[in-house]
Image (cartoon, rainbow, N blue to C red):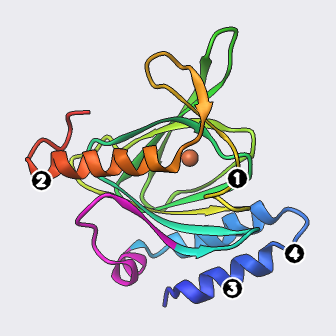
Amino acid sequence: MFDIDELVASCREALKERNPELAVKEIMERTMSNPAQVESVLGTPTLGGIVTLHHSRDLTVLKVIWAPGMSIYPHDHRMWAVIGIYGGREDNTFYRRGEEGLTQVGFKELETKDAVVLGGEVIHAVTNPKQGFTGAIHIYGGDFFNEPRSEWDPVTFEERPYDIENVMRQYAMANERLSKGHPASN
Ligand SMILES: [Fe+2]
Protein backbone atom coordinates (compact mmCIF):
# COMPACT_ATOMS: atom_id res chain seq x y z
CA MET A 1 0.00 0.00 0.00
CA PHE A 2 1.30 3.45 -0.88
CA ASP A 3 2.35 5.37 2.22
CA ILE A 4 3.75 8.93 2.23
CA ASP A 5 6.02 8.33 5.24
CA GLU A 6 7.45 5.20 3.61
CA LEU A 7 8.03 7.09 0.37
CA VAL A 8 9.91 9.84 2.21
CA ALA A 9 11.91 7.32 4.25
CA SER A 10 12.90 5.46 1.05
CA CYS A 11 13.98 8.72 -0.57
CA ARG A 12 16.04 9.67 2.47
CA GLU A 13 17.81 6.30 2.19
CA ALA A 14 18.33 6.96 -1.53
CA LEU A 15 20.15 10.21 -0.69
CA LYS A 16 23.01 8.05 0.61
CA GLU A 17 23.52 6.50 -2.84
CA ARG A 18 26.16 7.68 -5.25
CA ASN A 19 23.43 8.65 -7.76
CA PRO A 20 20.44 9.41 -5.55
CA GLU A 21 18.31 10.62 -8.45
CA LEU A 22 18.49 7.20 -10.11
CA ALA A 23 17.57 5.45 -6.86
CA VAL A 24 14.66 7.87 -6.40
CA LYS A 25 13.54 7.22 -9.98
CA GLU A 26 13.34 3.49 -9.17
CA ILE A 27 11.28 4.30 -6.08
CA MET A 28 9.03 6.53 -8.20
CA GLU A 29 8.58 3.80 -10.84
CA ARG A 30 7.48 1.35 -8.16
CA THR A 31 5.15 3.95 -6.65
CA MET A 32 3.58 4.84 -10.00
CA SER A 33 3.07 1.20 -10.99
CA ASN A 34 -0.20 1.45 -9.06
CA PRO A 35 -1.51 4.97 -9.72
CA ALA A 36 -4.99 4.24 -8.37
CA GLN A 37 -3.47 3.38 -5.00
CA VAL A 38 -1.54 6.66 -4.98
CA GLU A 39 -4.70 8.60 -5.78
CA SER A 40 -6.63 6.80 -3.06
CA VAL A 41 -4.09 8.08 -0.52
CA LEU A 42 -3.45 11.57 -1.96
CA GLY A 43 -7.08 12.17 -2.87
CA THR A 44 -8.93 12.75 -6.14
CA PRO A 45 -8.02 16.26 -7.34
CA THR A 46 -10.63 18.99 -7.24
CA LEU A 47 -8.32 22.06 -7.47
CA GLY A 48 -4.89 22.86 -8.87
CA GLY A 49 -2.13 23.41 -6.33
CA ILE A 50 1.02 22.28 -4.58
CA VAL A 51 0.94 20.32 -1.31
CA THR A 52 4.22 19.78 0.53
CA LEU A 53 4.59 16.17 1.65
CA HIS A 54 8.16 16.63 2.93
CA HIS A 55 10.50 19.63 3.03
CA SER A 56 14.05 19.67 4.29
CA ARG A 57 17.38 21.15 3.24
CA ASP A 58 18.32 18.17 1.08
CA LEU A 59 14.92 16.76 -0.01
CA THR A 60 11.53 18.15 -1.04
CA VAL A 61 8.54 15.96 -1.90
CA LEU A 62 5.47 17.64 -3.39
CA LYS A 63 2.03 16.62 -4.54
CA VAL A 64 1.47 18.74 -7.65
CA ILE A 65 -2.03 19.01 -9.13
CA TRP A 66 -2.21 20.72 -12.52
CA ALA A 67 -5.62 22.26 -13.23
CA PRO A 68 -7.09 21.52 -16.67
CA GLY A 69 -5.27 23.48 -19.39
CA MET A 70 -2.89 25.27 -17.03
CA SER A 71 0.73 26.10 -17.80
CA ILE A 72 3.79 27.19 -15.87
CA TYR A 73 6.33 29.39 -17.69
CA PRO A 74 9.98 28.26 -18.09
CA HIS A 75 12.02 27.83 -14.91
CA ASP A 76 15.01 25.92 -13.62
CA HIS A 77 15.49 23.96 -10.38
CA ARG A 78 19.30 23.86 -9.86
CA MET A 79 18.90 20.43 -8.23
CA TRP A 80 17.85 17.06 -9.62
CA ALA A 81 14.15 16.32 -9.82
CA VAL A 82 12.16 13.11 -10.26
CA ILE A 83 8.64 13.50 -11.63
CA GLY A 84 5.98 10.77 -11.43
CA ILE A 85 2.45 10.97 -12.85
CA TYR A 86 -0.45 9.16 -11.16
CA GLY A 87 -3.24 10.67 -13.28
CA GLY A 88 -3.58 12.73 -16.45
CA ARG A 89 -0.69 14.13 -18.48
CA GLU A 90 2.13 16.64 -18.02
CA ASP A 91 3.74 18.07 -21.17
CA ASN A 92 7.29 19.29 -20.66
CA THR A 93 9.01 21.69 -23.05
CA PHE A 94 12.77 21.89 -22.51
CA TYR A 95 15.00 24.90 -23.16
CA ARG A 96 18.57 26.06 -22.93
CA ARG A 97 19.86 29.60 -22.69
CA GLY A 98 20.21 31.07 -26.19
CA GLU A 99 21.77 34.18 -27.68
CA GLU A 100 18.65 36.00 -26.62
CA GLY A 101 16.46 34.43 -24.00
CA LEU A 102 15.81 30.73 -24.46
CA THR A 103 16.03 28.17 -27.27
CA GLN A 104 13.67 25.18 -27.27
CA VAL A 105 15.64 21.93 -27.26
CA GLY A 106 13.08 19.23 -26.52
CA PHE A 107 9.56 18.17 -25.64
CA LYS A 108 8.27 15.22 -23.65
CA GLU A 109 4.75 14.05 -22.86
CA LEU A 110 4.54 12.42 -19.45
CA GLU A 111 1.59 10.07 -19.07
CA THR A 112 0.10 8.27 -16.10
CA LYS A 113 2.63 5.81 -14.59
CA ASP A 114 5.63 7.62 -16.14
CA ALA A 115 8.63 8.50 -13.96
CA VAL A 116 11.51 10.66 -15.21
CA VAL A 117 14.67 12.29 -13.89
CA LEU A 118 15.42 15.93 -14.70
CA GLY A 119 19.03 17.01 -14.22
CA GLY A 120 19.87 20.08 -12.16
CA GLU A 121 20.63 22.18 -15.24
CA VAL A 122 17.25 21.57 -16.89
CA ILE A 123 15.05 24.52 -17.86
CA HIS A 124 11.46 23.54 -18.57
CA ALA A 125 7.91 24.79 -18.96
CA VAL A 126 4.98 22.55 -18.06
CA THR A 127 1.46 22.33 -19.45
CA ASN A 128 -1.49 20.13 -18.61
CA PRO A 129 -3.06 19.70 -22.08
CA LYS A 130 -6.04 17.72 -20.74
CA GLN A 131 -9.54 18.80 -19.82
CA GLY A 132 -9.12 16.95 -16.54
CA PHE A 133 -6.67 17.32 -13.64
CA THR A 134 -3.16 15.92 -13.70
CA GLY A 135 -1.83 14.45 -10.46
CA ALA A 136 1.94 14.19 -9.96
CA ILE A 137 4.54 13.62 -7.29
CA HIS A 138 7.64 15.79 -7.69
CA ILE A 139 10.74 14.90 -5.67
CA TYR A 140 13.67 17.35 -5.56
CA GLY A 141 17.19 16.73 -4.30
CA GLY A 142 17.31 19.93 -2.26
CA ASP A 143 15.28 22.77 -0.79
CA PHE A 144 12.77 23.48 -3.57
CA PHE A 145 11.37 26.57 -1.87
CA ASN A 146 14.55 28.40 -0.90
CA GLU A 147 17.15 27.55 -3.53
CA PRO A 148 17.82 30.75 -5.55
CA ARG A 149 17.04 30.06 -9.21
CA SER A 150 15.46 31.52 -12.33
CA GLU A 151 12.18 31.79 -14.18
CA TRP A 152 11.61 33.26 -17.63
CA ASP A 153 8.81 35.41 -18.94
CA PRO A 154 6.71 33.14 -21.20
CA VAL A 155 6.47 35.78 -23.96
CA THR A 156 9.75 37.71 -23.88
CA PHE A 157 11.88 34.90 -22.36
CA GLU A 158 13.42 37.51 -20.08
CA GLU A 159 15.21 35.83 -17.16
CA ARG A 160 14.29 36.88 -13.63
CA PRO A 161 14.59 35.43 -10.11
CA TYR A 162 12.21 32.53 -9.46
CA ASP A 163 9.26 33.68 -7.41
CA ILE A 164 7.18 30.97 -5.71
CA GLU A 165 4.43 33.57 -5.10
CA ASN A 166 4.15 34.05 -8.86
CA VAL A 167 3.76 30.26 -9.24
CA MET A 168 1.03 30.21 -6.61
CA ARG A 169 -0.77 33.03 -8.50
CA GLN A 170 -0.77 30.83 -11.62
CA TYR A 171 -2.55 28.10 -9.66
CA ALA A 172 -5.03 30.61 -8.21
CA MET A 173 -5.80 31.97 -11.70
CA ALA A 174 -6.24 28.44 -13.08
CA ASN A 175 -8.62 27.57 -10.26
CA GLU A 176 -10.52 30.82 -10.85
CA ARG A 177 -10.94 29.93 -14.54
CA LEU A 178 -12.07 26.48 -13.50
CA SER A 179 -14.72 27.90 -11.16
CA LYS A 180 -16.01 30.02 -14.06
CA GLY A 181 -16.12 27.06 -16.40
CA HIS A 182 -13.27 28.14 -18.71
CA PRO A 183 -10.60 25.65 -17.73
CA ALA A 184 -8.56 25.63 -20.93
CA SER A 185 -8.20 29.37 -21.58
CA ASN A 186 -4.64 30.17 -20.72
FE1 LIG B 1 9.81 22.44 -12.69
For marks 1 and 4, the one nearer the N-term is 4
Q: Residues within 10 Å of mark 1 (few under 14, many from 20)?
A: few
Q: Secondary structure at mark 4?
A: loop
Type of the residue with mark 4: Lys
Residue 59 placement (x, y as % from top left): 70, 69
Q: Identify the residue at image location x=40%, y=52%.
A: 168
Q: Would residue 128 appear left or right of 184 to someone viewing this image?
A: right
Question: Which residues make up the magenta segment?
Answer: 36-52
Q: Residue furthest top?
A: 99
Q: Residue furthest right?
A: 18
Checking the image for residue 9, the label placed there is: 3
For marks 2 and 3, the one nearer the N-term is 3
Where does label 4 land, which residue? 16
Q: Identify the residue at image location x=8%, y=47%.
A: 180
Tell me the distance, in whole angstroms, between the alpha carbons under discs 4 and 2.
Answer: 44 Å
Q: Would residue 177 appear left or right of 147 to someone viewing this image?
A: left
Q: Secondary structure at mark 2?
A: helix
Which mark is nearer the camera, 2 or 3? Answer: 2
